[in-house]
Amino acid sequence: MPAPSKRLYTKRFDRADLLARVGAGANRAWTALAGWVPVGHDTPELGSGDARPGRVYLVGAGPGSADLLTLRAARLLNQADAIVYDRLVGDAILAMIPAGRERYYVGKARGHHSVPQAEIGALLVKLAGEGKSVVRLKGGDPGVFGRMGEELAALAEGAIPAEIVPGITAASGAAAAMGMALTDRAHAQQLRFVTAQLCREGGAPDWASLARTDETLVFYMGLAKVAAICHGLRGAGLPDDWSIMLISNASLPDQQSLTGTLGNMPKKLAENSLPSPCLIVVGSVVGMAEVTRWQEEVAEEA
Ligand code: SAH
């Protein structure tokens, strides 16, 4: 008997045939179907990643290492007329942009505020309005704490077509680099991405809902909030010896990490400062990183 479930992924769709059969709604249908056609098949222009004039591509650059970019992101970077990028996009990735293309840096300069979101939206609308193909390059995945919603709204308001190209979010990059499975079934049945910006004055995460022993928590933007996170989770009932790990510059040559417990991490961090960007992982999956490191050491000795 043939394996029935594989068919959807391997079937080649013929655009002319589809147009003839579905008529007016075909373009939308084709866009949806194109997403199912795997790379390497004769993909049509929709969804194939070719940069088109007057269009903005919101592209994820991954956690930093250039070879963690998707093929689609690399192709668009190579083709786009203009690239608008952030602080978290690494030099190795910027080096992939061909000479002579327009580049706009809209991240935060040291001691300065970042370019206001409204100005970034206006710049994207302007560039695409001039008929350029535009890549809006963001660290990690553009839809994970990336303010992509505001940019999509600005583009919709300016009647500029937009496409999203996902990227490897910092949590995936850091977990892979440290040898952890974020949802290892022995450790976690849930996984939550949390912005530590909630710890700002006046706001606080819902510690009671976050303090679970069957879950992995990943805090983004939390380096300055480590003490508040440890305090909040302990106050809500997680044990003092519950594991926490900080990973800076995940996937990059200067990657660094610090492992500890909710009880001792604030002191450890005070004694060994870590640079930005830094991700915080809380949960018993952190123990897997220890095992992986031990395996690596054994392999190196052999
Ligand atoms: N869109 C990005 C997140 C942007 S918010 C993504 O999907 O990864 C910025 C935060 O991401 C940083 O404060 C840090 O917590 C995290 N981050 C991004 N790149 C990182 C890296 N290489 N190593 C560790 N943390 C990283």
Image (cartoon, grey):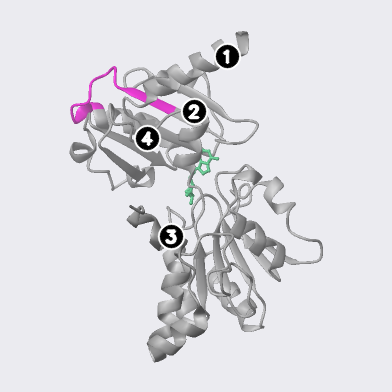
Between the C-alphas of marks 3 and 2, the distance is: 32 Å
Q: Which residue is mark 1?
A: 299
Q: Is residue 12 left or right of residue 25?
A: right
Between the C-alphas of marks 3 and 1, the distance is: 38 Å
Q: Is residue 134 above or below residue 114?
A: below
Q: Answer whether labels 3 and 4 touch (C-beta < 8 Å).
A: no
For badge 2, the amino acid type reads Met
For badge 4, the amino acid type reads Leu
Q: Secondary structure at mark 1?
A: helix
Q: Which residue is mark 2?
A: 178
Between the C-alphas of marks 3 and 4, the distance is: 27 Å
Mark 3 vs 4, N-terminal side: 3
At x 61% / y 66%, what residue is drawn? 135
Between the C-alphas of marks 2 and 4, the distance is: 11 Å
Which residues fall within the magenta stretch?
A: 234-245
Q: Secondary structure at mark 4?
A: loop
Specify the quadrant of the image occupied by residue 267: top left
Mark 3 vs 1, N-terminal side: 3
Membership of 108 in magenta stretch: no
How many marks do you count on the picture?
4
Task: Measuring from the top left, give residue 106's x and y in whole percent.
Answer: 61, 60
Q: Is residue 94 left or right of residue 223?
A: right
Circle 4 crowding by C-alpha within 10 Å: few under 14, some 14–19, many from 20: many
Q: Cβ(mark 3) to ligand 1 < 8 Å?
A: no
Foreground disc of the pair 2, 1: 1
Q: Is residue 52 left or right of residue 258?
A: right
Q: Is residue 72 above or below residue 162?
A: above
For badge 1, the amino acid type reads Ala
Q: Cβ(mark 4) to ligand 1 < 8 Å?
A: no
Mark 1 vs 4, N-terminal side: 4
Specify the quadrant of the image occupied by residue 98: bottom right
Q: Which residue is mark 3?
A: 9
